[in-house]
Amino acid sequence: MLTLSTDQFVGDNTVAELAVDTEQFDVGGLHAGSDTFLTAPIGGVYAISASICWSPDATGVRLLLLQVAHDDAGGGTGHRRPGVSSAAPVTGAPTCQTAQALLSMVAGDRVAARSLQTSGGTLLISSDAVLGGVDAGANLSMVWMGPAS
């Protein structure tokens, strides 16, 4: 599981990759160095999850997307978005959301989390474990469930 070590600021109507840069644990060798994504070491079905908490702001919409990059046989890269969380902001409190997916992947597929917000200004994604009394912190995790049938 990867977490965010410092707060991340996201501008209005800007897609930003979640800068998860701290490895909490890595069972199975899914993470390499300072990468902000996880890589499937073997083919199979994976459970993927990402969570974020935005600073309080009552305007716009918040999105959290899981994005999978897949290298095809021709050397190109295709992208899939198997998990999306869309949330209206919470008034006077952090807006927290989770995106999850079960996905059949091949060895080498890479998963990242991306965010988007439309508040009209810049918002913070918290790296803190608690934000405004709410369990927070940003993370990205992936677990191999078994072979694809």
Image: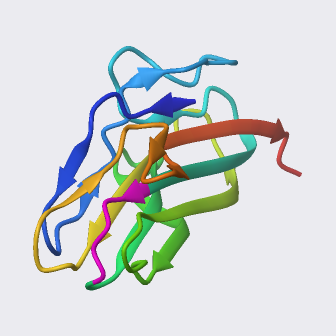
Q: Which residues are the magenta region? A: 53-58
Q: Is residue 137 visible?
A: no
**Pick the front one: 101 or 106:** 101
Q: Give the percent coordinates (x, y) of residue 122.
A: 13, 64
**Pick the front one: 79 or 129:** 129
Q: Is residue 126 above or below residue 38?
A: below
Q: Give the percent coordinates (x, y) of residue 100.
A: 64, 59
**Pick the front one: 72 or 116:** 116
Q: Give the percent coordinates (x, y) of residue 123.
A: 20, 62
The answer to which quarter of the image holds residue 3 is: top left
Q: Is residue 84 visible?
A: yes
Q: Residue at x 50, y 51 (%)?
A: 133
The reply, left or right, for residue 61 in relation to residue 13 is right
The reply, left or right, for residue 148 in relation to residue 8 is right
Q: Is residue 54 above or below residue 9?
A: below
Q: Give the percent coordinates (x, y) of residue 138.
A: 45, 44
Q: Is residue 43 above or below residue 126?
A: above
The answer to which quarter of the image holds residue 144 is: top right
Q: Which quarter of the rendered picture does the N terminus lie within?
A: top right
Q: Residue at x 14, y 72 (%)?
A: 12
Q: Main secondary structure of the magenta part?
A: loop
Q: How is the image coloured?
A: rainbow
Q: Residue at x 38, y 80 (%)?
A: 91
Q: Is residue 57 magenta?
A: yes
Q: Is residue 125 magenta?
A: no
Q: Is residue 3 above or below residue 109?
A: above
